Amino acid sequence: MTAPVLRPGGRSARVQESIHTAVRELLEEQDRSTVTVPQIAARAGVTPSTIYRRWGDLSALLADVALARLQPETESARTGSLQGDVRAWAEQYLDEMSSAPGRNMLRDVQSCLKPSYCATIIGGQLQVILDRYPDEPTPSVDRLINLVAAPIVFRILFSEAPLKVEELHRLIAIALSQ
């Protein structure tokens, strides 16, 4: 008799993924203010109580989906230089977060989760870039967050227009100067 094959994540992971997929699909089809837990449950093939048990309420679920989107599926671009890698990461982050879904995602995460979650994810992404250049003087992750990521998020959440790419490049140069 052979042992049963274990699937990574198991049933719980499959249920979570089906719920996340349902949320993403519904948000593409309709205004977020009209999305409900019963709609999500029906789309995901679960009961509403499954969602309430796991997330507590709709805003926590939306924040969880948003947080999952913040985590990149692929490694950031390798340009061959620290400045180029940071620029590529920052330009992509600015582009993604400046979009309507990106703005909503930032608001969802901001309203429901510990702010440190975002800083931890962004910090991890930036640390991967810094680790590529062990022989170069590099700034701290906190310096990059303070001078590059924070202005991006601030302008997206609290301004009429996102940070301009030229200003982003200027901030990157300041962050990388020693």
Image (cartoon, rainbow, N blue to C red):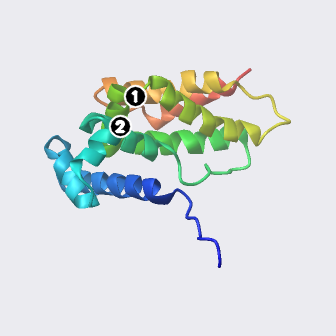
The foreground one among 150 and 60 is 60
Which amino acid lies under the numbered mark 2 shown in the image of this protein?
Ala
Question: Would residue 56 be found to the left or right of residue 126 on screen?
Answer: left
Residue 21 position, x and y percent, is 34, 57
Residue closest to the eye, 35 or 139: 35
Tag 1 or tag 2, which sits nearer the N-term? 2
Residue 62's spot in the image, x, y percent?
31, 40
Closer to the camera, 39 or 131?
39
Residue drawn at the location 53% of the way across and 28% of the way down? 119
The quadrant of the rendering that contains the N terminus is: bottom right
Query: Does residue 92 appear left or right of residue 24 in this picture?
Result: right
Q: Residues within 10 Å of mark 2 (few under 14, many from 20)?
A: many
- Residue 86 at x, y percent in the picture: 62, 39
Label 2, on which residue? 63
Tell me the amino acid under the disc marked 1. Answer: Leu
Q: Quadrant of residue 121?
A: top right
Q: Nearer the viewer, residue 59 or 100?
A: 59
Q: Quadrant of residue 74?
A: bottom right
- Quarter of the image that includes the C terminus: top right
SS of the residue under disc 2: helix
Q: Which mark is residue 113?
A: 1
The answer to whether residue 61 shows anywhere in this view is: no
